[in-house]
Image (cartoon, rainbow, N blue to C red):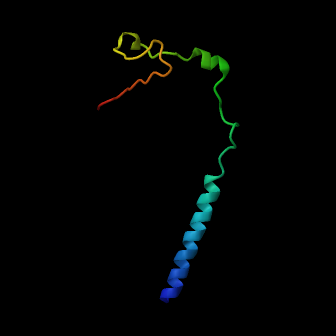
Amino acid sequence: MSKTNAVLIALSVAVLAFIAGYMVGNSASPPGTGPAITEEQVKELPTVAKGIESCPAKGANPAKVVVVEWTDFQ
């Protein structure tokens, strides 16, 4: 096998792999067809993390945005 043939085979395999990956990657469900959260479920979500009321804070109460950091060191 000549060097030119090896390069052409490698290039062909790369192109075919790219096309196959593109086809597989775009086979997902269209947007809006998956499971969605209902309005009732949104109303059940907590507006404030539990236990955050007694934590130190800066700024106006109630804040427009509350950032809660949760870390798990294992």
Q: Residue furthest left?
A: 74
Residue 72 on image: x %, y %: 33, 29
Tally the marks: 0
Q: Is residue 73 left or right of residue 63?
A: left
Q: Is residue 23 left or right of residue 48?
A: right
Of the pair 54 and 36, the residue shown nearer to us: 54
| Image height of 24 relative to 43, above or below | below
Q: Quadrant of the C terminus?
A: top left
Choose top left, top right, bottom left or bottom right for residue 38: top right
Residue 66 horizontal/vertical position (percent): 45, 21
Nearer-the-camera pick, 2 or 49: 49
Q: Residue at x 61, y 53 (%)?
A: 25
Which residue is drawn at the image coordinates 49% and 89% (left, top)? 2
Picture layout, residue 59 above or below residue 26: above
Residue 51 horizontal side relative to residue 43, left or right? left
Outermost front residue: 60
Picture residue at 55% right of the left edge, 17% below the top:
45
Q: Residue furthest bottom?
A: 2
* Residue drawn 61% across the image and 20% down it: 42
Q: Whole-percent x and y of residue 51?
A: 39, 12
Above or below, comparing residue 48 to residue 37 in the picture = above
Tell whether 17 sits left or right of 30. left
Q: Is residue 7 above or below residue 58?
A: below
Residue 18, position in %: x, y? 58, 64
